[in-house]
Amino acid sequence: MSSQIAAVADVRDVSKTYGARKALDGVTVSVAPGEMVALIGPSGSGKSTLLRSITGLIPIDGGKGKIIVFGETVQQNGRQVSSVRRTRGKLGFIFQQFNLVGRLSLFSNVMLGALGRLPAWRGVFGLWPPEDKEKAMAALHRVGVADYAAQRANTLSGGQQQRGAIARAIVQGAQAILADEPVASLDPVSARKVMELLVELNRRDGLGVIVTLHQVDYAIRYCERVIALKAGKVVYDGPSAGLDRPTLIDIYGPEFEDAFWETQA
Ligand SMILES: Nc1ncnc2c1ncn2[C@@H]1O[C@H](COP(=O)(O)OP(=O)(O)OP(=O)(O)O)[C@@H](O)[C@H]1O
């Protein structure tokens, strides 16, 4: 079952246990198409685990938990369904550690976004159709790093690589972006640029965005909705404007100010 109005991600009563530790504990959240949602919470609260469970990269606990992405079940009762790869093709991933192939050029990395739609041999031999090459260059222009197209990815700055990862998601034709701490390793200027690009993809192209963030001010500034996790449970799900002092103390404890105001610079 899939339809235009299916949620980007429908997470129903999902738990994930590592040994004696519950990384996720009965999490239920749903993200609608076109939403831009920040996932916040203290270190170890389960943000990455939730994001990676949605992609199907981490198997959830058996039982009644279920994850549905764009109307298609990704995993259920601790098992991935066989169509998970196809469903994953609708999601663009951006990780903190710039998941580009370091020895390939930025351009080749962005072209890899087209691989889901093309026979693999074209990628192996670099025989990309001209229209895909044009698409890749247009995406690199759009994110502002076209001048670096020929440069090896591992020689680019973190901000340039992260923009390349966004260009790859554009070429892939992703319908939503899942970004796991995409700005954690970036200087404030590069971080703002990356967040602004995510906002633009959300507002202009209608892509759903779920982004884990360490700094609360990024969440408030760029995302209308915030989901906060604490010890694997959802402790806040609502407008970012509702994150007042008592709520933040509840989420982060009395040291919550440490999670604040990186972008003032
Ligand atoms: N592969 C693993 N094996 C064992 N425990 C794990 C594993 N991955 C995560 N955990 C544990 O699950 C909990 C949630 O981890 P997770 O990485 O999802 O938190 P997070 O909120 O993303 O943290 P951070 O903000 O520090 O990245 C933590 O207690 C972590 O130690």
Image (cartoon, helix red, strand yellow):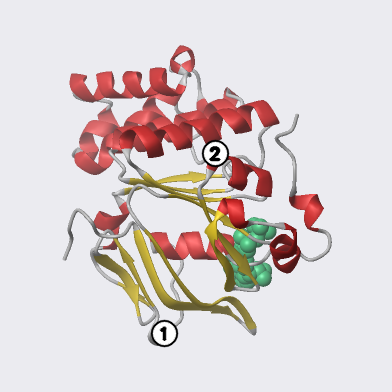
Q: Amino acid at mark 1?
A: Gly
Q: Secondary structure at mark 2?
A: loop
Q: Can you identify the residue that label 2 sits on? A: 98
Q: Is residue 210 above or below residue 49?
A: above
Judging depth in this view, the residue of 229 and 127 nearest the camera is 229
**Amino acid beneath label 2:** Phe
User: Residue at the spot x=62%, y=28% of the render?
Assistant: 190
Does any portion of residue 165 appear in the rendered image? no
- For residue 7, side relative to residue 22 (left or right): left
Residue at the (31%, 43%) spot, across then down: 174
User: Looking at this rendering, what residue extends furthest in the right direction?
Assistant: 254
Q: Residue at x 32, y 51 (%)?
A: 33
User: Residue visible at 36% across and 82% down?
Assistant: 77
Residue reaching furthest bottom?
63
Q: Position of residue 259 (x, y in %)?
A: 75, 51
Tag 1 secondary structure: loop
Q: Is mark 1 within 8 Å of ligand 1?
A: no
| Residue 74 seen from this side | yes
Residue 89 position (above or below residue 60): above
Q: Position of residue 248 (x, y in %)?
A: 71, 60
Question: On the rendered structure, is 47 left or right of 166?
Answer: right
- Look at the picture and state if 192 lies above or below 130: below
Whether the residue under disc 2 has CB within 8 Å of ligand 1: no
Q: Residue furthest top?
A: 147
Task: Name the residue beneath numbered marker 1.
Answer: 62
Q: Is residue 82 left or right of residue 67?
A: left
Q: Quadrant of residue 135?
A: top left
Q: Which is more toward the observer, 180 or 2?
A: 2
Question: Which quadrant: the C terminus?
Answer: top right
The image quarter in which residue 155 lies: top right
For marks 2 and 1, give the CA distance.
32 Å
